[in-house]
Amino acid sequence: MSKILLIYKSRTGFTQKYAEMIAKNIQCDIYPFSELRKVSLSNYDTIVFGSRVHAGIIDSFSKVKKIAKDSNLKLVLFATGATTNESIEIIEGVWKSNLSPEELQSVPHFYMQSGMNYEKMGFMDRTIMKLMSKMIEKNADSSGDSSKDQMAITMSHDISSEEYIKPLVEYVKGM
Ligand SMILES: Cc1cc2nc3c(=O)[nH]c(=O)nc-3n(C[C@H](O)[C@H](O)[C@H](O)COP(=O)(O)O)c2cc1C
């Protein structure tokens, strides 16, 4: 049986919530990314890493990738974002820009839609989001069809669900 370390990085709570739901369904030890340094990696053979998509980049994935490689651990990735699960092309784009062609084959990766939490966001993130909202508003004024995008990023909302952990949980159970 594989010994699994589940590491999550979460700023506004969505990824943490998903990580905790996953940890209830698989046998693993769970730690926030900030405590990864304290963990004895030799006790494990697999890292499941969860993080947010932040302006197209999976936060801290490159660091965890290196740690997994250096410690010879199998890596499983999940990413959370405000993009809906149905936006398959956008999600494919995220994978392609964060994983090399070789990693796309070797690192199992799962996307879980989450939402947006302005109340828990840091100052910088809130400022970036306000700018992006204004841009989308402008585009909506000229094209009239961006109302869904606007909804998705201009206000706090939660579109997460325990349903979305299932593919990852099934995968890990079958390892
Ligand atoms: C500045 C900023 C940029 C974001 N960029 C994206 C993005 O490119 N794609 C996406 O799907 N979600 C994006 N989001 C939404 C977050 O990924 C989403 O809220 C995530 O689940 C937050 O995770 P956390 O609550 O664990 O920190 C962004 C949020 C912020 C604040």
Image (spheres, rainbow, N blue to C red):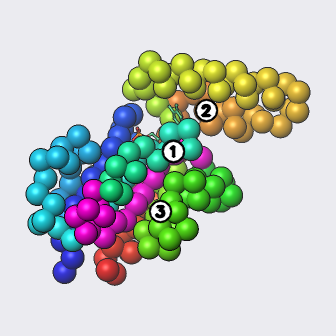
Q: Can residue 160 be seen in this view?
A: no
Which residue shows up at 52% across the image and 54% down it? 98
Precedes in sequence: disc 3 or disc 1 = 1
Note whether 115 is above or below 131 in the view shown: below
Q: Any magenta on residue 126?
A: no
Quadrant of the image occupied by residue 52: top left
Precedes in sequence: disc 3 or disc 2 = 3
Q: Any magenta on residue 78?
A: yes
Q: Does the closest atom of ligand 1 sit within 8 Å of the Cβ of label 1?
A: yes
The x and y percentages for residue 90 are 65, 53
Residue assigned mark 3: 110
Residue assigned mark 1: 57
Which residue shows up at 56% across the image and 44% down it? 56
Precedes in sequence: disc 2 or disc 1 = 1
Which residue shows up at 72% across the image and 25% down it? 135
Q: What element carries label 2?
A: helix
Start and end of the magenta stretch?
67-83
Q: Which of marks 2 and 1 is in front?
A: 1
Q: Residue 153 carries which label?
A: 2
